Amino acid sequence: MRLYPLEALAAAVLTAVLTIPILGIDIVVDGPRITLTGEALPVLIAMAAVFVVRLFQEPLKTAIGWVRMDRLLPSPERMTAYRPMILTGLIVMALIWPFTVSRGAVDIATLALIYVMLGLGLNIVVGFAGLLDLGYVAFYAVGAYSYALLAQYFGLSFWTCLPVCVALAALTGCLLGFPVLRLRGDYLAIVTLGFGEIIRLLLNNLDQLTGGPDGIGNIPKPTLFGLEFARRPSQEGGVTFHDFFGLNYSGGDTVIFLFLLALALVLFTLFVINRLIRMPLGRAWEALREDEIACRSLGLNPTVIKLSAFTLGASFAGFAGAFFAARQGFINPESFTFIESAVVLAIVVLGGMGSQLGVILAAIALTVLPEVARQFAEYRMLIFGLVMVLMMIWRPQGLLPAARPRLKLPQ
Amino acid sequence: MADFLPQFLQQIINGLTLGSIYALIAIGYTMVYGIIGMINFAHGEIYMIGAYVGVIVITALAMLGLETIPLILLLTLAISILVTSCYGWTVERTAYRPLRGSPRLVPLISAIGMSIFLQNYVQLGQGARDVAMQPLITGGWRFGPEDGFQVYLSYMQVIIAVVTVVFMTLLTLFISRSRLGRACRACSQDREMANLLGIDTDRVIALTFVLGAALAAVAGVLVSLYYGLVNPFIGFIAGLKAFTAAVLGGIGSIPGAMLGGVVLGLTESFTSAYLSTEYKDVVAFSLLVLVLLFRPTGLLGKPDVEKV
């Protein structure tokens, strides 16, 4: 066993330089004056941790080598065999869930389902087509604001607006993608990032239309075949859910209804995407991700294929956005910051790019874990960032990578 | 109408000041892109850390009772450069070097993760609020009639211009004259060939990150002196704009990054003056999209770009 005392010392000194200005010195703002106070403990802890890790680097590496991720997690091929079972299990659990747990838990599950929708949509763009979209939240915002504005100005219902929102988000995606997708891949990342910011700035500044930073409130909730979920009908002659079925009014019904609606929308999304990736178009997405030159030489038009993936991904974000606006009843530009895009990207990366089951499980995990570990809420984004880096180093294909379509010749 | 010319001049001064800052950050993007073909998303956060170190050192020196302004400026720049260089090196070593040779998407996602990590790390360490600092260098020159619109050139704006020019000159000399600079240029032309010829390419890549981070620190210190306001989120927008500047000038080209920064700074100050302040960011990003559409190689980019 070799130890590295000198290297460990150097690493500890480097850690001191890195942490002293951020963790070791606190800026105290006292009116117009600012002063500094020192805090040695965090720096010493960081230095000690780095020193120990670097000193025992070799035995640690061997130890990590024993715990092979590949052996802990089932192989993609075996996952494909389990897939129907796991999916059925998840759906059954989701159907029982709202009737057995508290309102808060159902609400969190609804949020998780929104992220599942977003993750599945972004998975088309990043996972299947291999295009890095960092402004995905823009299309989510387009969907949400479309519904909110249509409901506010024209009094249209959720079900009328849903297809319109999807169409508008798709149109936005198409308009942005058309010029940009001819560019090299990493330019796309930065342009989409800029576009996400443009949309947020527009929402913030078009005060007359969008209400600016105050947002839009009183967005109507979805109805069930015209039955409203409210104590009293909002319009003269309207019928409420509990009146129609002769039940007592309960606020919990709305929560459960929204959850089941979200579940239905997720299943619809899953169904559509599963059909799409078996179509020639879906195959072309994956082929293009693997080798653009080979695709060109086989007569596929890369721009059209990329544009279709980008537009479809955007349309699912619009779908999720409309539902989000309906569920919240209130939206403002703060819900559509870059952080939101980063969370959805983390879901796709963590679950495994191109793996739908992985994305679903990652979306559930990344929404439920922060709720469970509320005392660590301020570390949430820190850990997200760290996990993204570590995943790229240790397991770039994600926790549950997608199985590649393949055939085996019988011996 | 009589005010038109002085106002125009004022916008040029403001635009050049802003442009110098963008140019300093943009060089870090362009050099890294020139050598390993990757967008270093964490670069904006390095600039933000540089600004924080600037505020801390200036406050510490004031608490120690130091009052010679040139000395404060030099010490602040030196310490800030030291710290961010360490950050640049560590980020490259931990988040990017293990990924050398993987598909393009992988280091890009790692860079985004690093950027989120650094932003939240500073937020945890120093809090999310704005830190406002008393201006250290005040005053300036006024030109023009007493009763009309006066063109104002502050001492700080002159310092920003001078410091930027000094560091740009140093960098240009380093890249064109020194042995390591030659190695940098060789790596950007053909990394494998440079490696075969005995250049330690890993070291050159690390050097690129360190140089970029040092210039970002200079930008950070200048910003903390000029605006006197820092928070953990300034790196995101500044990074995005500096990248726009790098693309505008032709990514991979150092003179291009300088020119791109100045053009973007001017565009922004004219937009705020003649259109509206709220839309200056929108205009800057639209400029990025338009440049990528109509001239993807940038202003100074030729098919055979002169890279770092």
Image (cartoon, helix red, strand yellow):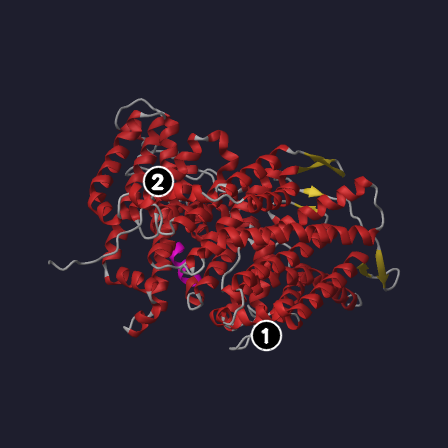
Q: Quadrant of the C terminus of chain A?
A: bottom left
Circle 1 sits in a helix, a strand or a loop, which is it? Answer: loop
What's under tag 1, amino acid-wise?
Answer: Leu
| Magenta stretch holds residue B154 | no
Q: Nearer the viewer, mark 2 or mark 1?
A: 1
CA neighbours of label 1 inside 10 A, class few (<14), some (14 to 19), many (20+): many
Residue B19 pos. (x, y %): 67, 63
Query: In the image, is A393 to the left or to the right of B164?
Result: left
Residue B251: name its quadrant. bottom right
The residue that mark 2 highlights is A113
Residue A178 pos. (x, y %): 41, 66
Circle 2 sits in a helix, a strand or a loop, which is it? Answer: helix
**Along the line of sight, the residue nearer the viewer: A118 or B184:** B184
Q: Residue at x 26, y 49 (%)?
A: A76
Residue B26 sits above or below residue A361 on the image: below
Residue A49: name its quadrant. top right
Going by the picture, which residue comes out furthest to the top?
Answer: A248
Stretch in magenta:
A168-176
Which chain does the numbered disc 1 sit on? B
Query: In the image, is B172 to the left or to the right of A309?
Result: right
Q: Main secondary structure of the magenta part?
A: helix
Q: Quadrant of the N terminus of chain A?
A: top left
Residue A1 sits above or below residue A97 on the image: below
**Along the line of sight, the residue nearer the viewer: A331 or A269:** A269
**Along the line of sight, the residue nearer the viewer: A68 or B220:** A68
| Magenta stretch holds residue A169 | yes
Going by the picture, which residue comes out furthest to the left?
Answer: A411
The residue that mark 1 highlights is B300
Going by the picture, which residue comes out furthest to the right?
Answer: B146
Residue A320 pos. (x, y %): 37, 46
Query: In the image, is A174 to the left or to the right of B40?
Result: left
